[in-house]
Amino acid sequence: MDEVVDGVLRLRLGYVSAYLVVTDDGLVLVDTGLPRTHTKLQQQIADAGRSVGAIRTVLLTHWHTDHIGGLARVQRASGARIVASAIDAPVVAGRRRAPETPIMKLTKGITGEPEHAPVDEALSADGPFSVPGFTAVHTPGHTAGHVSYLLDRVGGFLFVGDAAGSARGKVRSSPRMVADDQDAAERSVAKLATLEFDVAVFGHGAPVTGGAVERFRELAAG
């Protein structure tokens, strides 16, 4: 567990990260990790002097198992509201079959199967929503309904999800082998590059702090 900035904690859950945000309205969790990493998530939150039961809202970037695997257990422990895109919400809730790529089907033995949970707020447009300080930015491509979240803090703090990743201080495209639509994913990177934010955190890869939007502009420029 690392504190990226004051009040935003990175939870390391195997090869994926989730994020805990301390707000005036309670704790907000961005993504939940794999099904088998829930105990690790609980422990890291406890190490920070908090508890899963204090989570008020879960923001989901997309439906992939490594991001929603712990969702149902978090919801049962906390009663948290769940927010996701209107496009991905039926998969999160188990009402629609997940459109898995071949590599995702092959790796099910590693990732496990997520336990589904109902979505309380389905986002269909960019902009502010029910959680103060957060803005939804729809970034389709990795999944059809992928959403990134911009937090009004420290000059702009972007929760990228898997719209992009990071490696050695640079922003990189998310892997083609798990993309729903690679062309859309590239357009979403270009969209993020038009925003203003200083810090970016990812589902995969280390945070980029200080001038993060410039790394997105470099990637978008190709």
Image: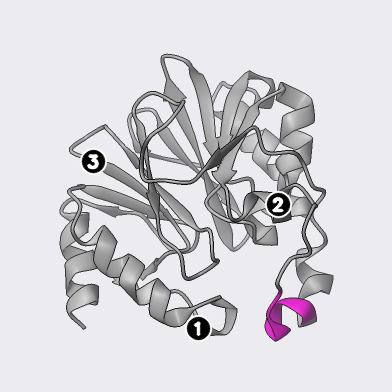
Q: Which residue is mark 3?
A: 156
Q: Amino acid at mark 2?
A: Pro
Q: Is residue 189 above or below residue 18?
A: below
Q: Secondary structure at mark 3?
A: loop
Instruction: Using the numbered discs, state the Cα–Cα distance from disc 1 to disc 2 in whole angstroms.
Output: 23 Å
Q: Which residue is mark 1?
A: 176
Question: Disc 1, disc 2: CB below 8 Å?
Answer: no
Type of secondary structure dominating the magenta stretch = helix
Q: Nearer the viewer, residue 161 or 135?
A: 135
Q: In which quarter of the view is residue 78 placed?
A: top right
Of the numbered discs 1 and 2, the one sitting upstream in the chain is 2
**Bounds of the magenta span?**
100-105
Residue located 71% across and 42% down the image: 71
Q: Which residue is mark 2?
A: 90
Where the C terminus falls, by quadrant? bottom left
Using residue 134 as the reference point, say whether residue 16 is left or right of it.
Answer: right
Q: Position of residue 145 (x, y in %)?
A: 53, 58
- Is residue 169 visible in this depiction of the protein? no
Q: Secondary structure at mark 2?
A: helix
Instruction: Using the numbered discs, state the Cα–Cα distance from disc 3 to disc 2 in whole angstroms.
Output: 30 Å
